Amino acid sequence: MTKLEQDLIAMFEPTIEDMGFELLGLELAQAGRNSTLRVYIDHENGVNVDNCADVSRQISAILDVEDPITNEYNLEVSSPGIDRPLFKPEHFVKATGEEVRLRTKLPQDGRRNFKGDLTQVNGDMITLNIDGAEFMIMLSNVEKANIIAKF
């Protein structure tokens, strides 16, 4: 996570929690001169479009005052959806036993993309079972991770 992403979480989290939601995490995807700031929120009763719009208005006000992003960007506030993103260690703990897809920051075992069952979380280390082989990956090396939805 970049310093800017950490700063944005620190800016948004108190407001989002005061509104009764959990800030799961955020992604700042930069594509040339335009960027997308995607903020994921959750609630024990789920999240609807009106909730996302309310949180978006509050975050927009914070961004207007603080102005932390120097280039143009689009703000998206979203529920985690069925392919729930995993940001924090506690998210990985809750996802134990689920099939996940993740990408590492640095190559590990000659690859950066992994898809398998999350079998264990031990401190800063997760274990994935991929076709009977176990892979241990440091959480600090995870760039992006999602639960794979099963129908």
Image (cartoon, helix red, strand yellow):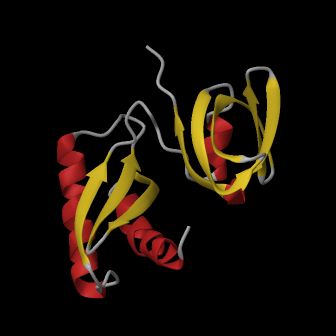
Quick one: 73 or 76, which is closer to the camera? 73
Quadrant in which the N terminus is drawn: bottom right
Q: Is residue 56 left or right of residue 40?
A: left
Q: Residue at x 66, y 50 (%)?
A: 89
- Residue at far top of view: 151
Q: Residue at x 36, y 34 (%)?
A: 45
Q: Residue at x 38, y 69 (%)?
A: 12
Image coordinates of residue 113 in percent, x first then y, are 61, 42
Q: Residue at x 30, y 40 (%)?
A: 47
Question: Eyeballing the image, is 4 above or below 140?
Answer: below
The answer, for residue 18, to whether it is visible in the render is: no
Image coordinates of residue 116 in percent, x first then y, are 66, 28
Image coordinates of residue 93 in percent, x first then y, are 68, 40
Q: Is residue 21 left or right of residue 59?
A: right
Quadrant in which the C terminus is drawn: top left
Quick one: 75 or 41, which is closer to the camera? 75
